[in-house]
Amino acid sequence: MYFNNSSTYSSHHNFLEDYNPNREIDKDPNRLLPKGLFNDMMDQGIESNQSSIQFDNVSGFTNAQFYNALTNNVNSMLDYKALILQQNNFNQQNEVTQLFNEYGY
């Protein structure tokens, strides 16, 4: 897949903003990795007009928080969501839940 650079964002950033877990495998062989979700949990909202996500009011999560929530007890994205919320005092719980729903989890 190819995304054009915009005046503000790189093609890589536009790709993350347009993440879609339902994309055809031949167009994105890593479509099941929630790379766009992680990006959206860190950034300041929807930054690209190429975004397929309509709701992104989550910000401020870190790679360390994502990593710490990857434990042996996580067997699904719903397990992961519950643990990352629990470990972070349910910070932005409603917004995180809605964002996970946007991604189909």
Image: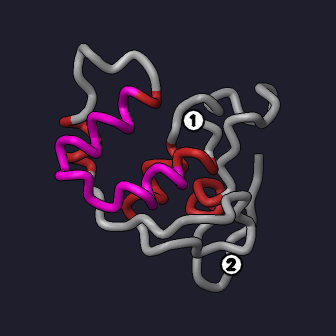
Q: In this view, does 69 lie to the left or right of 20?
A: left
Q: Distance between the residues labelled 2 and 1?
A: 29 Å
Which image quarter: residue 66? top left
12 over 8 or under it: above or below:
above
Position of the C terminus by quadrant: top right
| 42 relative to 39 in the view: left or right | left
In the image, which is nearer the foreground, mark 2 or mark 1?
A: 1
Q: Does residue 68 appear left or right of residue 76 in this picture?
A: left
Q: Where is residue 29 in the image (x, y as percent from the top left)?
A: 68, 27
Write the residue at 45% across / 21% down. Answer: 76
Q: Residue type at mark 2?
A: Ser
Q: Nearer the viewer, residue 23 or 79?
A: 79
Q: What stretch is highlighted in magenta?
A: 79-99
Name the amino acid, label 1.
Tyr
Residue 28, percent from left and from top? 72, 34
Name which residue lies at 70% across and 44% down: 20
**Image quadrant of residue 26?**
top right
For the residue labelled by badge 2, is the local secondary structure a helix, a strand or a loop?
A: loop
